[in-house]
Amino acid sequence: MLGFPLAEVFTHVPVLAQPVLNSFAELGPLLAQQPDRSGVLVDCTLGGGGHSALLLEAHPGLRVVGLDQDPSARAAAAERLAPFGDRVRIVAANFAGFVPSEPAVAVLADLGVSSPQLDVAERGFSFRLAGPLDMRMNPEVGESAGALIERLEEAELADLIYAYGEERLSRRIARRLKEQVPQDTAELAYLVAGCYPPKARRGRIHPATRTFQALRIAVNNELGVLDQLLQVAPDWLVPGGLVGVISFHSLEDRRVKTAFSSDERLQRVTRKPETATEEEQSSNPRSRSAKWRVARRR
């Protein structure tokens, strides 16, 4: 059982809301071309339902199939999207294994870990709060971050932290974590920070950020499922349909950029990624690294 209220902790503001609305403004004419003047948006990372709510309000003919493997997210989204009635269907699924029942007019994926997940210590995502070493998007399935650290050999752990976190001190950190296996997120953050020189521990970015990112990516196979989504999503779309992805680090963005520019099924809409305005970055610091790219089905 999860030890916190499901819907209450998942209230958050969707990142890059205006760029998403602007890019998906094309859905109006596209929906008008459909036989019943309606169409489906597959929201691959439903979260609290923020992006879906905005798009449902903007496009009365739109229906949403929202996917999320996190039960707290699904509970919050069900509450937030209840006013839209049968225009919304929520599915407990990872987008990598999903097959839509009808062609979609749009596919949306927000790859970031949401603020509610980071801010609830019990989820084990945050280096600022003491909690179990979990980091699973679906807390009922798979191997936790703590189990992963214990299972891997030192060299394997170092390679993982370097590959997924782009962490230059990966070997030093892996050695420390195998010598003194952390018992919770606070201890993990402390051990990683101790691998840095004292001056480097006081920067704007916490020294444990990259290690936490690497472990989270590995635990949830985030890059593997993203690669799979980029391969299958174009086939979900009607001609002219849109696929948009919000990424939060270079490992994701490079994959999205490559897929959108090299896939013969797609035509790039955004030549360069759209990013948060200074105002949004000020009000929501987690938007600083967000990048939005869009492509259209040929």
Image (spheres, rainbow, N blue to C red):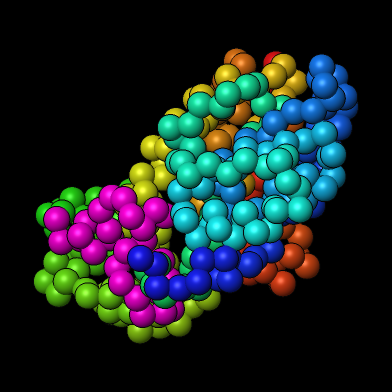
What is the x, y in percent for residue 122?
Answer: 39, 72
Q: Which residue is at 40% across, 73% downward?
A: 3
Q: Please tell me whether residue 298 belongs to the stretch shown in magenta.
A: no
What is the x, y in percent for residue 258?
Answer: 54, 30
On screen, 9 above or below 265?
below
Q: Which residue is at 68% across, 39% downward?
A: 64
Magenta segment boundaries in residue numbering: 125-151
- Which is nearer the eye, 96 or 227? 96
- Say whether residue 118 is left or right of residue 194: right
Q: How many marks?
A: 0
- Which is nearer the eye, 110 or 290? 110
What is the x, y in percent for residue 107?
Answer: 64, 34
Q: Which residue is at 35% across, 76% downward?
A: 131
What is the x, y in percent for residue 280?
Answer: 74, 65
Q: Quadrant of the C terminus?
A: top right
Image quarter of residue 94: top left
On screen, 218 above or below 285?
above
Q: Which residue is at 11% across, 71% downward?
A: 179
Q: Please tell me whether residue 136 belongs to the stretch shown in magenta.
A: yes
Image quarter of residue 44: top right
- Which is nearer the eye, 161 or 134? 134
Image quarter of residue 277: bottom right
Q: Quadrant of the N terminus?
A: bottom left
